[in-house]
Image (tube, rainbow, N blue to C red):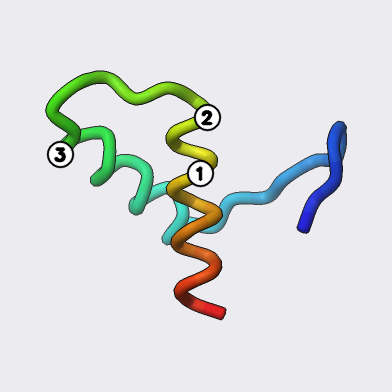
């Protein structure tokens, strides 16, 4: 996992996941919520 201050590379699949999440959310999501969603998605795929 990337440490604080390191660069993070998102795949096309990551971006599509985030866009779908934002489109389907009933209210705006914070950056922290989006990061948590990506972490959970990564844990499910591992």
Question: Where is mark 1, residue-wise?
Answer: 36
Residue 13 percent across, percent down from the top left: 42, 60
Q: Position of residue 40 (x, y in %)?
A: 48, 58
Quadrant where the image shows the N terminus: bottom right
**Which quadrant does the C terminus fall into?**
bottom right
Q: Is residue 10 above or below residue 19?
A: below
Locate residue 19: give its quadrant: top left
Disc marking residue 16: none
Nearer the N terminus, badge 3 or badge 2?
3
Spatial CA distance of label 1 from label 3 is 16 Å
Please report whichever mark, 1 or 3, sits nearer to the chain's N-terminal start: 3
Please tell me the numbered disc located at residue 24: 3
Mark 2: secondary structure:
helix
Q: Is residue 37 above or below residue 1?
A: above
**Between 26 and 7, which is closer to the camera in this rendering?**
26
Residue at image position (43%, 48%) is 37
Q: Secondary structure at mark 3?
A: helix
Q: Is residue 26 left or right of residue 37?
A: left
Which residue of the protein is positioned furthest toward the bottom in this rendering? 46
Residue at left 53%, top 65%?
Answer: 42
The picture places residue 44, in percent across and down from the top left corner, at 46, 73
**Nearest to viewer (mark 1 / mark 3):** 1
Drawn side of residue 46 relative to residue 5, left or right? left
* Relative vertical location of residue 43 with respect to residue 29 in this rendering, above or below: below
Seen at 15% across and 39% down, the residue is 24
> Residue at 44% across / 33% down in the picture?
33
**Label 3: how many residues lie within 10 Å, few (<14), some (14-19) or many (20+)?**
few
Which callout, 3 or 2, points to the residue nearer the camera?
Answer: 2
Q: Residue beneath label 2, please? A: 32
Q: CA distance from mark 3 to mark 2?
A: 17 Å
Marks 2 and 1 close (CB-CB < 8 Å): yes
């Amino acid at each position: 996992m990337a440490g604080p201050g390191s660069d993070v590379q998102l795949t096309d699949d990551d971006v599509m996941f985030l866009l779908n999440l934002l489109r389907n959310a009933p209210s705006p999501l914070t950056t922290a919520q989006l990061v948590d969603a990506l972490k959970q998605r990564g844990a499910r795929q591992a």
